[in-house]
Amino acid sequence: MVEDWEKLNSEEVANYRIFKMRRDRRRSPRTGAEHSFFVLESPDWVNVVALTPDEQVVMIHQFRHGTAEITLEIPGGMVDPHEHDPAKAARRELLEETGYVAEEVIHIGTVHPNPAFLNNRCDTYLALNARWQQTPQFDGAEDIAVALIPIEKIARLIGNGRITHALVVAAFYHYENYLRLKLDMDKH
């Protein structure tokens, strides 16, 4: 049986705009040895699978500095400190990045992006009947182009490596699982 590791101490090592880094000292319950671990403290994130009335996914092309590549993703971002409801952050990110609004926003899943060293979570929302409302409002570090992709093409785009962002792939898993569960509920 795996047990929790006793936290001996914790100290902030660095503080950046989108995350803090801390070093935790913990004791192994199996060996008794002490080890240091680095943790990135990051705000929670949201992702939005936004569908137009004609079953197109509102997606974005964006340059990502970590891979130095332009990626194909769904809209998403950080939950701001004053936003206590991630669904509000999902609506905000959808509007800011794409100019689209949705009639209904449904929570369809949650993942921990990388629990080995990140302490946050990413909630995925399904935004139904998304319609264009206004010009996107990018922050100073964003350069985004909106694309509408038919939902039936998404699996192929994941399979051929065009969609590679792990949280986006997880979001589409949540979407497929949502549809499967909804179908099962409709049968009963």
Image (cartoon, helix red, strand yellow):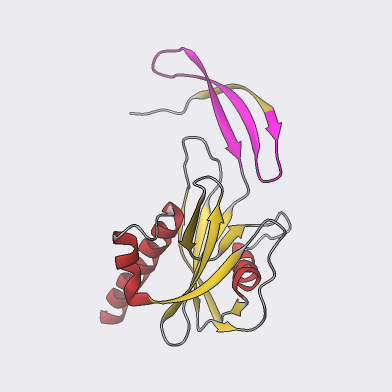
| Placement of the C terminus among the 4 image quadrants | bottom left
Q: Residue furthest left?
A: 187
Q: Is residue 12 above or below residue 186?
A: above
Residue occupying image coordinates x 47% and y 47%: 112
Q: Main secondary structure of the magenta part?
A: strand
Residue numbers of the magenta segment: 13-41
> Toward the viewer: 27 or 78?
78
**Residue 155 percent coordinates (x, y):** 31, 67
Residue ID at (29%, 77%): 183
| 38 falls in the magenta region | yes
In front: 161, or 180? Answer: 161
Residue 98 versus residue 22: which sits nearer the camera? 98
| Residue 28 against residue 77 in the figure, above or below | above
Q: Residue at 56%, 62% (x, y): give it.
A: 76
> Which quarter of the picture shows residue 86?
bottom right
Taking the magenta stretch, the answer to whether it contains residue 165 is no
Query: Can you give x and y, in whole percent of width and height, for residue 157 in the image?
Result: 34, 65
- Please give left or right for residue 3 compared with residue 6 in the image: left
Q: Quadrant of the N terminus?
A: top left
Q: Position of residue 154 (x, y in %)?
A: 35, 69
